[in-house]
Amino acid sequence: MQTRNLKVFFLKLENFIARYRRLAVVVFAVVIIQIFESILLFYKYDLFTGGFLQPFSYKTFSERLIFVGLSLWFDLSLIGLLASLWFVIADKLNKYGLIIYYSFTAIVVVFVGIWLAIKFKVLSYFSDTLNLQIVKNLGGGSLKEALLYISNEILLFMGILSLLIVCLVLFINYLKGRTFVKRFAENTVEHRTYMELLVALIVLTPFITLFVSNNDFYRYGLEKQIAYRLISLSLDKLSDFDFDGYGSFSYPKDKAIFNAHIYPEAFDVPGNGIDEDGFLGDALISPIASDSLAKIQPIPGKNIVLIVLESARVDLLDQKINGRYVTPVMREIAKNGSVIKHAYSHTGYTVTSITAIFNRDPVNNKPKITLLNFLRSAGYGISIISGQDESFGNVAANTGMKNPDTAYFDARTAINDRVFPSTEQGSLRLSEERVVSQFQTRIEQVDFTKPQFFYLNFQAAHFPYTHPKMAKRVIDNPIPRSDIIEANKDWVAASYWNAVANADWAVGKVIEALNARGILDKTTLVILGDHGESLFDDGFLGHGHSINDTQTQIPLIINDPTIVADEPIGQIDVAEMTIRSALGLDNKWSNRNKTVFQWVGSLSQPTLIAHVKQDGVRTLFDFRSEEVFFSDLKSWKSYQEALSDPVYKDRVINLIREWEALRWEEHLAEKP
């Protein structure tokens, strides 16, 4: 009886598949694609658990259910439409049978698989799991290098894809022996149900796309999937009535769909009477402030050692592991010198941060005197010793590090001493021991009858917070890269602090070398971070995707006890502060109304912009939702609501006006 019921069930199933074979083949292809995309979203983005550079994740059952449901909808819509075109062509050619359905499934799965391999493995990640947006912000990298970096992962992925295709072929061959498969060659079945469902999908999809495009949370994940991106971009093009490249379905949206001059991220030309970017009316031409450094006479002073610590958190001086301070050397410097408690990076990216430190401006402002040009005018010898490849993002060229009069050494120079196998720009790193060794060699070569400037860059705290040559200074087992997940956040943090301890050791060796030459008391020593680092303590891992104290507040330590900073200090201020210390000039910074400008993305296409004040109060504008966050209120207000608030509107206006002014400044700097 049981066997008979089973046969009846399979017979009904065969009849159902034969009757709705077009719908079945679409569902079958979508299921395979969903498996691929879900694995990659989990593996590379940690989308369901949270991971490196991961601002959103779907952790609850309801969040995952909605995300998967939306994902299935868009995949069914896209694959269903493609299948319809395929079947129309087949019908016109009088081609029927299993080969039609098999060929469609195989072609779709193979092409989608190849695209996923390229998109997720190459475009979405570069070097230490950096996504494409961050790579653009860093200003370096190439597709060739990215391919080389993830070649092993692509081979693994393609191997899995090939295995699945083989399984599919075997399954199809097995089906050929089944009686019901022969019915696939008959053109006797009406496909009315399939067409009705497809029409319903086509009618409803624009509304669902519009919902997703207005929802930051679900849009973040769906934008990483092929179907949603293709559908939203196609609908966006169809709704681009003024042909300015922006419509109403993708992000960002066009605020004036019939005005080609106004569109998202448009450059707002000051004084032309048009509000191109849609904020605060026409942009204003802000007078360029005088360069305060130009008022200082370039004369010889103390030697300068500027040390930049990769991914250094502001709380490194207070951190303990197993009852021991992680940074005893830097604590001693801070004790006898100055600690700037409210120092900030302008971005969460290394390239823009280093450029801001050396060029004293968030953009390439030609009128401003750069740090190295001032020092050259003052007769300083210049030595660059970096644990990273300073050509990444054109930092070396843009800051004057590679001028003929400069002694230059970085990870590209000593490529055979790298700590990781990869030779890509973004992955090249030297151990702290190697950088210290080069400094010890260089300090014996220079002529200290004239002042010297040394730039040192220590990469110890860079993700993944350890490397094969790193010493175990405060823990015995740094976390393997594959285990870096939120569930292991305590282990991640301990490994990070062990890396910081290695940077502190390196600083100690620099001081020893200065002491050995008898020049420590004749040297201004400046230590700062390029940006902070989230260690899952605020729900994120990494940097560059959020504007908060964890990711943008940095340590700034100077062995000069006379410095007074009663205002927020940005990285663009560090050069002048350093020079004033080296020359023994007044070094008091006391403008309590000053703000430091910060952004995520690029100035032309920012995701977030913010002003931060001395007390850490931020005004943050989110371009995704056009909402303003006031940290002192701990609440969000819509852009229009904030502008109508007499107490807070000036903070919003000042923030957006500075952003527009910086874009104008950037535009002028790009002119020949």
Image (cartoon, helix red, strand yellow):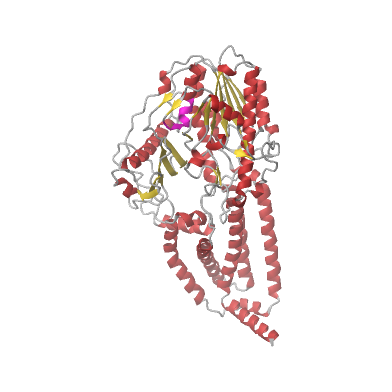
Going by the picture, which residue comes out furthest to the bottom?
A: 1
Q: Quadrant of the C terminus?
A: top left
Q: Please determine whether, in this image, residue 656 is positioned above or below residue 87.
A: above
| Residue at (32% x, 38% y) in the render | 283
Task: Decide which of 471, 11 is in the foreground and name it.
Answer: 471
**In the rendered image, is residue 312 in sight?**
no
Q: Please determine whether, in this image, residue 550 is positioned above or below residue 194.
A: above
Task: Decide which of 143, 363 is in the foreground and name it.
Answer: 363
Tell me where the magenta segment starts and ends, as one range: 567-575
Task: Decide which of 105, 479 is in the foreground and name it.
Answer: 479
Going by the picture, which residue comes out furthest to the front?
A: 323
The answer to whether residue 190 is left or right of residue 473 is left
The x and y percentages for residue 535 are 57, 45
Q: Please determine whether, in this image, residue 667 is positioned above or below residue 66.
A: above
The x and y percentages for residue 115 are 59, 54
The x and y percentages for residue 422 are 67, 40
Assess whether residue 571 is covered by the magenta stretch: yes
**In the rendered image, is residue 439 in sight?**
yes
The x and y percentages for residue 494 are 63, 42
Q: Quadrant of the N terminus?
A: bottom right
The answer to whether residue 621 is left or right of residue 229 is left
| Residue at (56% x, 36% y) in the render | 318
Assess whether residue 431 is covered by the magenta stretch: no
Task: Decide which of 513, 326 is in the foreground and name it.
Answer: 326
| Numbered marks: total | 0
